[in-house]
Image (tube, rainbow, N blue to C red):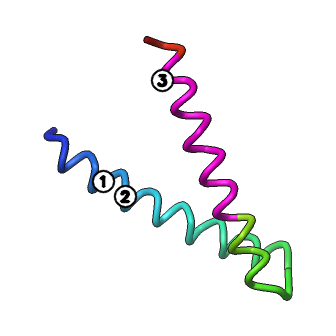
């Protein structure tokens, strides 16, 4: 897989994860404030990215 293809797949997976977390927070937790669900989703994704980078750096 080339770098462009893997990058595009990563971006699409990231978008799918963000939408999934937002939907889960909004529907299942029943938060009335959708913006709060968006903030939680984005912070979760950022923490996930940082954790992944940390794991990759440790593995080197």
Identify which residue, 30 or 7, lies in the foreground: 7
Number of numbered discs visible in the structure rendering: 3
Give the Cα distance between marks 1 and 2.
Answer: 5 Å
With respect to residue 57, does 5 lie above or below? below
Give the Cα distance between marks 3 and 1.
Answer: 18 Å
Q: Residue at x 60, y 54 (%)?
A: 45
- Provide the residue designation for mark 2: 11
With respect to residue 5, does 19 lie above or below? below
Q: Residue at x 54, y 61 (%)?
A: 17
Q: Residue at x 46, y 65 (%)?
A: 15
SS state under label 2: helix
Q: Earlier in the sequence, mark 3 or mark 2?
A: 2
Q: Earlier in the sequence, mark 3 or mark 1?
A: 1
Residue 20 on image: x %, y %: 59, 68
Quarter of the image with the C terminus is top left
User: As drawn, which residue projects farthest toward the left?
Assistant: 2
**Secondary structure mainly formed by the magenta segment:** helix
User: Is residue 21 toward the left or the right of residue 17 in the image?
Assistant: right
- Provide the residue designation for mark 1: 9
Q: Quadrant of residue 32?
A: bottom right
Quarter of the image with the N terminus is top left
With respect to residue 32, does 38 lie above or below? above
SS state under label 1: helix
Give neighbour class at mark 3: few <14, some 14-19, many 20+ (Cα, 10 Å).
Answer: few
- Provide the residue designation for mark 3: 56
The part of the chain drawn in magenta is 41-57
User: Is residue 15 toward the left or the right of residue 6 in the image?
Assistant: right
Is 52 one of the magenta-colored residues?
Answer: yes
User: Is residue 36 toward the left or the right of residue 18 in the image?
Assistant: right
């Amino acid at each position: 897989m080339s770098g462009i293809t893997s990058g595009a797949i990563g971006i699409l997976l990231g978008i799918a994860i963000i939408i999934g977390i937002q939907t889960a927070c909004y529907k299942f937790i029943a938060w009335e404030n959708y913006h709060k669900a968006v903030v939680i989703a984005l912070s979760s994704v950022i923490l996930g990215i940082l954790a992944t980078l940390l794991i990759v750096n440790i593995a080197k």
